[in-house]
Image (tube, rainbow, N blue to C red):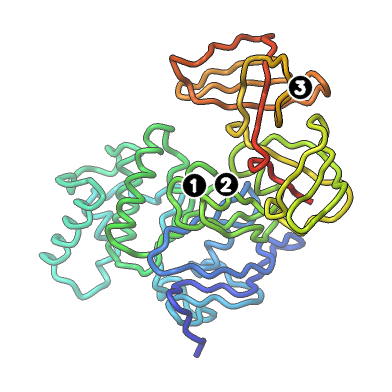
Amino acid sequence: MPQKQNHSIVLLTDVRKSFGAVKAVDGVSLNIGKGEFFSLLGPSGCGKTTLLRLIAGFEKPESGQIIIDDKEMAFVEPNLRPTNMVFQNYAIFPHLDVEENVGYGLKKRNITKDKMIEMVDEILDLVGLRDLNKRSASALSGGQRQRVALARALILKPKVLLLDEPLSALDKKLREQMQMELRAIQRAIGITFILVTHDQEEALTMSDNIAVMFDGKVEQKASPRELYLRPISKRVASFIGNMNFFTGKINSVSKSKVEIEADGLGKILMNRNQFSKEPTFGSIELGIRPEMLTINKSQSKKVANSEEAKIEEISFFGESIQYKITLLNSDLILRVSEMYSREGIEWKVKDCVSVSWTLESLFAFK
């Protein structure tokens, strides 16, 4: 009998799965809490979908341990696990109506017809499909098909709901709407959702915690805020949001400060706690988010943490404006993002400006 984990519903320990020479899942260990909205995030081929299928039981691990609700899953078939899955293509039965699709999994259970209809009505109300019981599956929109697939999975009352990129086929506006609805449904019913996605914004918006995966391994597990503000590696930093990268060299290290000769920025001092790993002498990679840079009028007198620059490109995104700038003293190219304001200065291409930053906004990666 496995040792009970406090507040844990899914526990993975050194799980491995290969397909030929490809290590799809390479020693993954994760602890996913009860009631969490948890996301597996990473580029295509990183192993996130294989990991989801291992949890569901559709794939068997070569080694490692998968525990769900304090029970070892090694010899438990998919249909006997306390999980259910919403697939990327929804797998809606085209010859059945909404009610028949949603209630399909209840047929083998000892439930009366009246009780089944009551359960279907209740779950359709939850997912926003009230009074659509008799609508043909072929007459459903993409968003409605997604809701039917979700209702069909939830009606069986799983302890863990697994979602394999369920919003990828929807257009941007509908996808954003469904993100909010999925999160609201998860909070309403209180069960654990595990989402697989390659969309960083989707994971940040919906999740309590995120595991970022590369090459079959978990690079970092953290809350959305921590992943964005304290990424532990350059790969995580560049995958979560946008980042300007440039190189530097550590000249000295004290108890609290690190002096760096940074390309394009000259000598700068950083706090030791800004480093993802213990700082050591030698080359280092630095990064700063575009929104952590500020464009000002060109300065006649040099001020701390600023450099003269020229605007090369301007892209308008409605609520924000993105600039491509070049530092005049080094030809270093940076991206800057600022919220649009009617009262703000309207910069133009080729304008000479000053770009500034705070030392606390810099990231350092070995």
The spot of residue 6 in percent (x, y) is 45, 78
Residue 327 - label: 3
* Position above or below: 128 against 176: below
- Identify the element where label 1 is drawn: helix
Q: Earlier in the sequence, mark 2 or mark 3?
A: 2
Q: Residues within 10 Å of mark 3 (few under 14, many from 20)?
A: many
* Image quarter of residue 116: bottom left
- Local secondary structure at mark 3: strand
Q: Which secondary structure lies at badge 2? A: helix
How many other residues sit within 10 Å of disc 1, few (<14), some (14-19) or many (≥20)? many
Residue type at mark 3: give it: Leu
Residue farthest left in this picture? 114
Percent position of residue 131, x then y: 14, 45
Q: Which residue is mark 1?
A: 204
Residue 311 in view in this figure: no
Which residue is depicted at the point 82% across and 37% down? 267
Residue 216 seen in this snapshot: yes
Q: Which mark is residue 228?
A: 2
